[in-house]
Image (cartoon, rainbow, N blue to C red):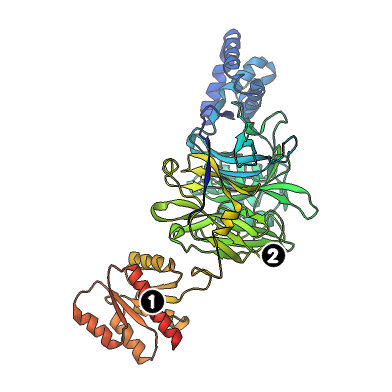
Amino acid sequence: MAINVNRLETIFLPDPQRVIVRFFFPGPESRVKKIIKKVIEIEDEKAQLTFNQALRNFSDRHRNISKIFAKHFNHVRHFVVELGYNPDEIPEFKLLLIGAFFTHEYSIESAAFFNPSMVEDPDQSNLIEGQKRVIVSFRATGEGHISSIVFRGGIVNANGSIDFYESNRLVDEAEVIRKSQYTKIDFLAKLSEMEVTKKIVIDLVINRLPDHFDYNQLTEAVNLSREEVRQTPSNKHVLDAVHWLASSNHEITFSLDTAISDRVIFPISASESNGIEDARFVKFTNDDGSIVYYATYTAYNGYTILPKLIETTDFYHFKVIPLYGEKAQNKGMALFPRKINGKYAMVSRIDGINNYIGFSNDINVWQEAQLLQEPIYPWECVQIGNSGSPIETERGWLLITHGVGTMRQYSLGAILLDLEDPTKIIGRLEEPLLVPNKKEREGYVPNVVYSCGSIIHNGKLIVPYAMSDTASSCMWVDLDELFSKMIPEDETKYSNEKAGNILVVEDDLIFRKIIKEMLSTKNYNVVLASDGVEALMKISNSKFDVILSDINMPNFDGFQLMNYMNEKEIHIPVIFMTSLTDEKFELKGLELGVIEYLKKPINLELLNLKLERILKSKKKT
């Protein structure tokens, strides 16, 4: 029976008026120099009028726009010198005008506003009983499909409703501070984890560096290497990735006069050309009781994925570092809100299909993980993943999940993990917690609901969620009702103990996959073989309860397989599956000892009944 879901009326839609100013480089350098030369040669009076007009048009859209023009002028100052001009002899308004020509507005959320994550605000002052102040992060997508992290603030009321603060037009990009030190060994190890392995190009950079180096030294080494190496797409990707890795270890800070909705964490360099994806924020309690907020997210530059960790205590100052280790190389990492048995814990989807759990002594390094949860229900057959960090409750760790079913429809689910040993699932929802309704299924990516982090308040699970990768909303469910709908893991037919081990022998790749997916929904462990020869290899290495085999296959057909098994006295029940309609084939199979004969296309329920009968008969003997 479905859970009562209370959807809120609040919908966060993309807002094209939310813009930041970015450095604009129209390149190549020859074009940049031409622009600078034209501006310098403008008569002072006309230049002053043009600059004043820029101030009038944009000063009310951005804080201290003239300061931004000055910063962007400094980015091209060296070109002024190369052209033979002395910047100290040029009027200040003309220098700022040059900066204005190398500035543009970027609409951070004009395309989509989705994949939200909710945490408690560090400031819980001046609230009435039953209220909780929250911060919600979103993935905002604008021009060029570049994504950034933006925020909204609000207050959750006792009844589950949320009053969100109105956002301003003014948006601030953070000031970036790079001051990290690197060692060659660790840096090379991380490049290997990122699968950046073109040794000739990497060595060209690394050999220019001391054993310990900083960001500026590496930037100089990369720039010198660009001049020497052939500018092929492959070499360029490698050099960009090297520079990107160094850029990824930094701090960012926002002005204290910015509201939470004014702050945007934008990709720090052009090499993050595909932006920042799906920050999963969590309020983390240290062993000494102090609080820090962490978020994991994935950056992508079209060439390699780089998982990162954000750390903050106030949402004004953030530290950003790459995550290291073999098990920190995919999307969807979500940190537990405290250490478990002295170790950090993380859920992730390493293989893109299943949920995993890992433990580490170092929050930045993740080398080991084990399988936690596989897709078993029809609504999650394609893949599953987490929808944010686990939430600690008296009954266990509540992990909101997502599953992908038919027509690539995303739904939200939930599992319950043991408090002391979260590798153990103690309960799970048999039906989805949230399925996209008629209004939510239309968007940039249809039929998707998705979340990156929820909270519990006043006996309610509060879930912010994305709608078809376009907009976002919130909902809540009663926590006791949610727990009551969870099936104990050891009492459901979909338990971790498999219903049986099935070997499927079929030369048609598509049909093999279909049969595997069909049987997996019934909790069978399925092994595949493409013909009789491969089947014999599987039989020699594993134990099977039943074999499902096609008849007409190359390299040892179904009849040859049965003859061999009879000669070697291999006693495994065999069911033939075939599109052959001649009764003589069915008769021959039965004579060889085949116990069932099914016609394609296979009826799943009929197959399951036959398998249950065979396995039940085997247990009696």
Find numbered disc 2 in the image and state the secondary structure of the residue it sits on: loop
Image quadrant in which the C terminus is located: bottom left
Q: Nearer the viewer, residue 539 or 225?
A: 539
Q: Nearer the viewer, residue 421 or 489?
A: 489
Q: Is residue 257 above or below residue 608?
A: above
- Residue 526 pos. (x, y %): 43, 72
Question: Spatial distance from mark 1 to mark 2, Cα to Cα?
Answer: 37 Å
- Residue 450 pos. (x, y %): 51, 48
Q: Is residue 128 above or below residue 478?
A: above
> Which amino acid, by three-letter code, is at mark 2?
Glu
Q: Could you classify mark 1 by the number of other residues whose Cα lies within 10 Å: few (under 14), some (14-19), or many (20 or more)?
A: many
Q: Quadrant of residue 606?
A: bottom left
Instruction: Name the residue located 61 percent from the left edge and 66 percent from the top edge.
Output: 424
Indicate which disc residue 35 carries. Answer: none
- Residue 216 pos. (x, y %): 69, 41
Q: Which residue position is annotated with label 1?
A: 611
Instruction: Name the residue located 45 percent from the left edge and 76 percent from the top edge.
Output: 500
Indicate which disc residue 420 carries. Answer: 2
